[in-house]
Image: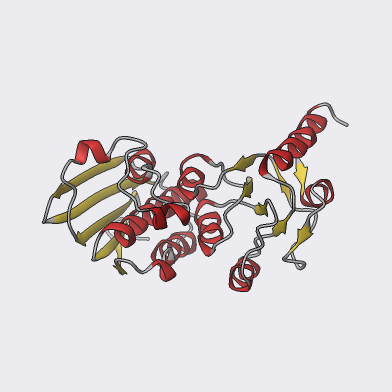
Amino acid sequence: MDAEEVYRDEFPVRGGDFANAGIAARRIKQLLKDMGLDPQTVRRAAIVSYEAEMNVIMYAWEARIALAVSPREVHITVDDRGPGIPDVEQAMTEGYSTATAEMRELGFGAGMGLPNIKKNADVFTIDSAAGRGTRLDIVIRTNGHRT
Amino acid sequence: MIVLKDVLALLEGELLTPACPLETAFQKVFASDLMSDVLTSAEPGSLLLTGLSNTHVVRTCSVADLAAVVFVQGKRPAAEVVDQARSENLPLIVTKMPMFEACFRIAGLVEDGKRGR
């Protein structure tokens, strides 16, 4: 890939669409794998995408996951239309969750999603307010090598 | 190293994905019903033991690079879940043992491996 070249793609996610949960994350994972990124970067990006996708499905109405891959980093942006998060600091606390029983039965909603996204990111920013929706900005730095 | 065929025998399990190689090996084991915990803490290449049997288990394993799944307590996944695992070459085992018993037996396997038995 040329030094200036950036691969871009977008993946729509619909709130409540549990049947298709994980499709965006798996497409992102396959794309990064096909680009020859190192397995650890691919795994981190896949986990971040999946956690973000599940959050949209569980809590928002719809979102767009934007992927931008440059030689040095994977940039994932999640922009949702939804109720927003009234207290971001609280939502970032491990174990804090507003998940319903149905979400928990599926194995999610343990209050680990946002902290896990942060853990797997080199740069993580969250911008949210009640009634406005949520925007996540995630950067994962690659080791610069491709196979 | 833990090998799939030993897990199958020890847990008196049934392999739901017969095409998957029985020599598949794992270095780590993770047990949880919470896919959130799997995404947070399981290491790639691990064997997962879980009491959850929905499609999100296979999706989570695919995203987080887990190597195989044991469904405990006879929690047999639906055909579509098995089909999905087959298409991803993810071995699935079902055992009637409860989670504690299954973990206890696999822990013995891990200890034996450490002692070179």
State whether residue B53 appears in this view: yes
> Where A147 falls versus A117 (above or below)?
below
Q: Is residue B40 left or right of residue B53?
A: left
Q: Residue at x 82, y 46 (%)?
A: B10
Scheme of colours in the image? secondary structure
State whether residue A37 appears in this view: no
Residue lying at the far right of the rendered structure:
B117
Q: Residue at x 54, y 47 (%)?
A: B33
Q: Is residue A129 left or right of residue B34?
A: left
Q: Residue at x 40, y 66 (%)?
A: A18
Image coordinates for residue B64, horizontal then vertical, percent: 51, 51
Q: Is residue B16 left or right of residue A72?
A: right
Pick the residue in front: B53 or A28. Answer: B53
Image coordinates for residue B67, horizontal then vertical, percent: 64, 52
Image coordinates for residue A118, horizontal then vertical, percent: 33, 40
Q: Is residue B13 left or right of residue B53?
A: right
Indicate the quadrant containing the N terminus of chain B: top left, top right, bottom left or bottom right. Answer: top right
> Where A147 falls versus A10 (above or below)?
above
Pick the residue in front: B6 or A140. Answer: B6
Pick the residue in front: A7 or B78. Answer: B78
Q: Residue at x 55, y 62 (%)?
A: B54
Image coordinates for residue A4, horizontal then vertical, percent: 27, 58
